[in-house]
Amino acid sequence: MSSERKTILITGGLGQIGYYLYEELKRQYNLCILDNKSSSKFEPPEDVIFIEGDIIDRAVFSQLPEIDFVIHLAAQISIEKSTQSPLFDAEINVMGTLNVLEHALKQKVQKFVYISSAATFGHPEFL
């Protein structure tokens, strides 16, 4: 990987959106993917730094290289799991996101992009 290029951390980077981002960004950036592989659709590409770990584990962030940007996709997206175990859902989606934000602040990242999914909204009766 080129040290002259900026490095992007993609959390949840082995999911559908993460893989599309990888395909678009791999020619211009060094990429680091952090994913726990719990609902991964893809295997880690060979041309990225891959860290298997969970965003709720603060220790995993010490394994990451220096980063310039963050694209945060990692989340618990199962509506069924969120209704069965709302505390687990909040731990990943709230506390995990706070861990990513704290790491981004420590690294003094230039940009932080948070991408959410339709699972956030559930099945509303009224809009």
Image (tube, grey):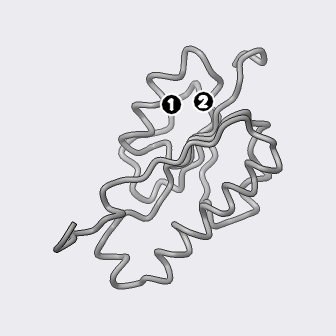
Expressed as whole percent of the image width and height from the top left, the position of residue 97 reads 60, 61
Residue hosting label 1: 45
Could you tell whether 73 is left or right of 63 in the image? Answer: left
Question: The disc labelled 2 sits on which kind of residue?
Answer: Val
Please, what secondary structure does the residue beneath circle 1 have? loop
Q: Residues within 10 Å of mark 1 (few under 14, many from 20)?
A: few
Q: Say above or below: 50 vs 98.
A: above
Could you tell whether 6 is left or right of 19 in the image? Answer: right
Residue at image point 79% right, 37% down: 66
Looking at the figure, which quarter contains the N terminus? Answer: top right
Expressed as whole percent of the image width and height from the top left, the position of residue 84 reads 34, 85
Looking at the figure, which quarter contains the C terminus? Answer: bottom left
Q: Say above or below: 32 vs 95.
A: above
In this orientation, which residue lies closer to the viewer: 80 or 48? Answer: 80
Q: Say above or below: 29 vs 62.
A: above
Question: The disc labelled 1 sits on which kind of residue?
Answer: Pro
Residue at image point 44% right, 59% down: 38
Residue at image point 55% right, 48% down: 72
Expressed as whole percent of the image width and height from the top left, the position of residue 85 reads 41, 84
Among the 4 quarters of the image, the one containing residue 53: bottom right
Residue hosting label 2: 48
In this orientation, which residue lies closer to the viewer: 106 or 49? Answer: 106
Q: How many marks?
A: 2
In this orientation, which residue lies closer to the viewer: 83 or 110? Answer: 110
Numbered mark located on residue 25 in the image: none
Label 2 close to label 1 by CB (< 8 Å): yes
Query: Which residue is situated farthest in the front direction here?
Result: 127
Expressed as whole percent of the image width and height from the top left, the position of residue 124 reads 21, 71
Q: Residues within 10 Å of mark 2 (few under 14, many from 20)?
A: some
Please, what secondary structure does the residue beneath circle 2 have? loop
Could you tell whether 119 is left or right of 85 in the image? Answer: left
